[in-house]
Image (cartoon, grey):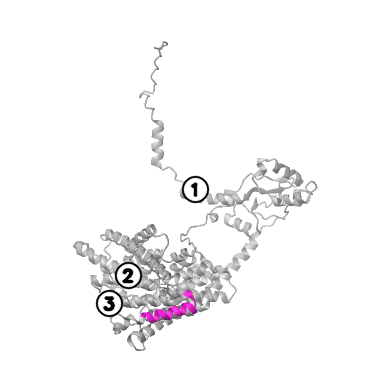
Amino acid sequence: MLRDNLDYKHASNINASADFRMLLVSFLAAAIGLIAGFVAYGLYTLIAIITNLVFYQKFALTLPSLKDNPLGLWVLVVPALGGLIIGVMAKYGTPKIKGHGIPEAMEAVLTNRSRIAPRVAILKPLSAAIAIGTGGPFGAEGPIIQTGGAIGSIIGQLIHTTAAERKVLLACGAAAGMAATFSTPIAAVILAIELLLFEFKTRSFIPLVVASTLATAVHFQLLGTGPMFTVQVVDFGIPGALPFYIVLGLLCGLAAVLISNALYWIEDIFERLPVNEIFLPAIGALALGVIGYFVPRVLGVGYDTISDILNARLALSALLMIMFFKSLALVISLGSGTSGGLLAPMFMAGAALGGAFAMIVNQIIPGANLSPAACALVGMAAVFGSAARATFTLIIFAFELTRDYNAILPLMLVCVIADGTALLLMRNSIMTEKLARRGLRIHLDYEADILQQVNVGEIMDRQPVAIPNTMKVSELADRIARGDKQFARRQGFPIVDKRGYLIGIITWGDIAEVVGEGTADETTVLDAGNDNPVVTYPDELMHHAVLKMLHNNIGRLPVVDRREPRKLVGYLGRSAVMEARLRRLHEERVREPGWITTAASDIIKRMPPANVPSNGKRPKRQKQSAKRK
């Protein structure tokens, strides 16, 4: 009896097992969401405590503003001390605390089967709290995302899970961390899909939503139901302001490219310094102290400054200073190898760019009437979205902040123009450049697998070369050796009985083994081959057929009729899989003539040649003179 590795009964068992595993992962995601919510609150509180102790010498649980800090010249030293502590932690703890968190989580997914060491979950938030609390110009969201991912990975390592399930749990922790920080659960889910999962499947989407929802609920309970930034109702000027938004999108894309390139250029400079790596974060922090002495708003998380920009409370000069010096402080500090997040500082720089753009345009073109708050919001989303190639995430993120539907059109326009600009000028994103330098290439485009869209019947060989079960192996080997066209291009041959029904399959390997034993004249093809072959059906997806090949370590499948399982109707080999891929390549690259081209071609065909008169009769050829001069 023929064997089908994925028959209906077995497939039902597989589906039931998959449903149970998805339910289990969802329960684990719920626990991760709750834990990540409390961890995010704990890190936020720890940053507030350290910041208050360092800058105001008091104990408080609310995050203070550093724009009017009383340290004076001490601000030159304090960040450097924090950087020195980070250098020691990176040297003797784990180097994974360096950077802004998300690339490290991506690397764990790509290279370590989503395994993150437990010490990362402890040292990353602690190092981020020290760096930010001593004046680092970072946000807490990147470290929280990495810490949440570490929590998810650790839970996935505590029990028996597959690498794919651990990846989902890691992404659940990362999404929960972002949701608990900004109270933006939808954007958190999309961020995890765009930057960590590299897939959009039910098995991952449901746990992500569960984790993000519960993490946001924890945020509501501990920090209130409002978003991180309170944004006033603004006039986005649609449709009159659309031309100006196009220009703003170009500027945001250029800003994203400039910040990304500057960050890795500074990082390269620090790596070449003849200094012990322990002291590198301190050197970067010393430069930060100098900047912070003259522009205090660049110090710390700066959520209050972002709120001021989004509500148009700052003058043009202040916006220009913040835009330049916050970006400079960010690339120097982070490039030195310290610990901190990218989101908040790039939000501040992008918002300042948008607000300054609106004010400048209003001065040059008085009738433009651009809203600085509106341009600040879309600039904030566009700069980071294009730098990280997470445009969809940032569109939803900004919309969740405002909860104003009128923001959608300018957000979409500015963000995609910025993304296109960055895509043309920058090969890798600010997240993937570090990984690319380590030899890791990430495919960020999402598309349906052609093998899940094509049936076996569309690709299979409908005229399989079947051989009778009584044929000797020696005869088959002779026909192959003579170069018979029917036999030369195939690696396997279905074996049929007198009625033409499939009863086995023989491959070149089987033939070579029998010939090597010297028994080819006495052995039939059925004795030498496999009398219980794995089969597929014309209505089965190519994806499932390829899975059968992989699971059974074979390269070919006889195709039989599902209603009459022994009736051979085709043959599926490796070349058929390539044919399916070739079909997708053909659809993407081969241009087909359009209606205009076809019509023009028909008109040209109907036109008479240039030397033929309009009546269609060719002129008579003149007789040549018989005499030659």
Q: Quadrant of the N terminus?
A: bottom right
Q: Does residue 307 show up magenta in the picture?
A: no
Q: Nearer the viewer, residue 31 or 581?
A: 581
**SS majority, magenta:** helix
Q: Which label's residue is closer to the chain start, 3 or 1?
A: 3
Amino acid at pointer 3:
Phe
Q: Which mark is residue 586?
A: 1
Image position of 481 (left or right of 197): right
Give the residue pinned by disc 2.
Answer: 349
Q: CA distance from mark 3 to mark 1?
A: 59 Å
Amino acid at pointer 2:
Ala
For residue 519, above or below residue 308: above
Is residue 507 visible in the rendered image? The answer is no
Is residue 173 visible in the rendered image? The answer is yes
Helix, strand or loop under label 1: helix
Image position of 625 (left or right of 504): left
Q: Which mark is residue 294?
A: 3
Q: Which label's residue is closer to the chain start, 3 or 2?
A: 3
